[in-house]
Image (spheres, grey):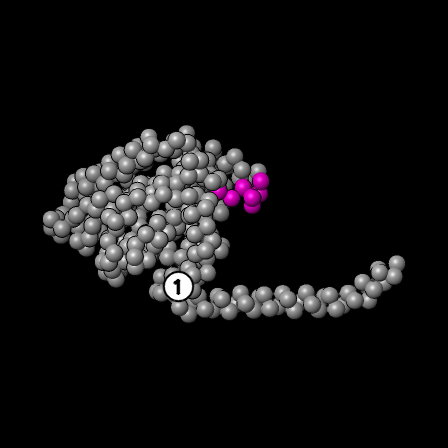
């Protein structure tokens, strides 16, 4: 009873202490937010934010997904280039892991900017995180601007259809609905590097998806995996599959004339060639792996 009385008498002190701690925490969050805003570029990427969150993603890269990056010497150490990859995983970890594959293996620690679908930026918190990490709203004009500035730009031509594949359809490369990367490569005279990513398909095995109510949430679909939504927020934790990211030899577009970018037949033909390279790379790497865990 005496201890209970002491607690009651000290309760105002505990409340004030909790308020003080919460105030300091909120103040630090506000300071961090302002710091990120002050050093962000015109697309919203913040070096401060990247520096703070990179250790988390480095843990995922090295220890959780155990990413094996091959062919990074095919990525130029300077100058613009387009990275074109297969898309999968329900939640797009493939963009951040590819970013780290380049960052960790090139001497000058190059950053990769990646084009992101509009709906991502409509998602609370997640959209801002993607922006701060280097994600850019997908458009031809934005991609051109990034390339003009000498950036590496990553594009996933499968789009939502890629990350929205059911588990039974894993590693079945969807048709490239968006062949704009070919027009970009021809117009900007930059190389295209086909990239294959093995391992992302297993982190959130998509067993079913609902599009019925997704539109009200600004999403293309609501995913159902073995863990989500059944385990709540824990269901968003990815499974620890073993990854391999292969950067294939660059495809040059210097021989093309500017007018070729307006020829659908040329654009479709060259996009199909890049897709075939990625598909062959996927099949080769899948054949070599022992299991999804190693």
Q: Residue at x 47, y 33 (%)?
A: 208
Q: Which residue lies furthest to the right in this view?
A: 1
Judged left or right of residue 23, residue 4 is right
Q: Does 236 lie within the magenta span?
A: yes
Q: Residue at x 19, y 55 (%)?
A: 188
Q: Which residue is drawn at 46% across and 44% down?
A: 64
Q: Is mark 1 on a helix, strand or loop?
A: helix
Residue wearing tag 1 = 47
* Quadrant location of the N terminus in the rendered image: bottom right
Q: Residue at x 39, y 44 (%)?
A: 67
Q: Dot 1: within a 10 Å radius of its alpha carbon, few (fewer than 14), some, or many (20 or more) residues?
A: some
Number of labels in the image equals 1
> Residue 140 in the image: x percent, y percent?
27, 53
Q: Does 206 lie within the magenta span?
A: no
* Quadrant location of the C terminus in the rendered image: top left
Judged left or right of residue 196, residue 39 is right
* Residue 78 in sight here: yes
Q: Look at the image and give the residue range highlighted in magenta.
A: 231-238
Residue closer to the observer: 166 or 141: 166
Residue closer to the observer: 225 or 285: 285
* Residue 210 in sight here: no
> Residue 88 in the image: x percent, y percent?
38, 40
> Residue 31 in the image: x percent, y percent?
51, 69
Q: Main secondary structure of the magenta part?
A: helix
> Residue 288 in the image: x percent, y percent?
33, 32
Judged left or right of residue 14, residue 187 is left
Judged left or right of residue 82, residue 257 is left
């Amino acid at each position: 009873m005496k201890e209970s009385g002491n607690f009651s008498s000290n309760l105002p002190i505990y409340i004030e202490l909790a308020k003080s701690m919460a105030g300091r925490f909120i103040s630090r969050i506000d300071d961090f937010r302002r710091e990120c805003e002050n050093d962000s570029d015109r697309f919203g990427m913040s070096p401060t934010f990247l520096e703070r969150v990179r250790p988390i993603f480095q843990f995922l890269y090295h220890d959780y997904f155990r990413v094996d990056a091959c062919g990074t010497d095919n990525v130029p150490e300077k100058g613009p280039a387009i990275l074109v990859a297969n898309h999968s995983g329900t939640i797009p970890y493939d963009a951040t892991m590819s970013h780290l594959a380049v960052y960790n293996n090139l001497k000058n620690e190059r950053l990769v900017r990646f084009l992101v679908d509009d709906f991502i930026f409509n998602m609370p918190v997640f959209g801002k995180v993607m922006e701060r990490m280097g994600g850019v709203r997908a458009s031809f004009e934005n991609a051109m601007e990034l390339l003009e500035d000498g950036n590496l730009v990553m594009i996933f031509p499968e789009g939502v259809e890629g990350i929205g594949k059911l588990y039974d359809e894993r590693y079945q490369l969807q048709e490239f609905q968006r062949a704009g990367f070919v027009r970009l490569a021809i117009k900007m005279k930059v190389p295209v590097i086909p990239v294959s990513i093995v391992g992302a398909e297993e982190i959130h095995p998509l067993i079913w998806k609902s599009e019925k109510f997704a539109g009200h949430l600004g999403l293309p679909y609501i995913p159902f995996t073995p863990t989500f939504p059944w385990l709540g927020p824990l269901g968003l934790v990815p499974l620890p599959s073993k990854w391999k990211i292969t950067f294939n030899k660059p495809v040059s577009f210097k021989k093309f004339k500017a007018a070729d970018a307006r020829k659908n037949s040329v654009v479709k033909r060259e996009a199909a060639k890049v897709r075939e390279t990625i598909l062959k790379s996927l099949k080769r790497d899948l054949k070599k792996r022992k299991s999804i865990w190693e």
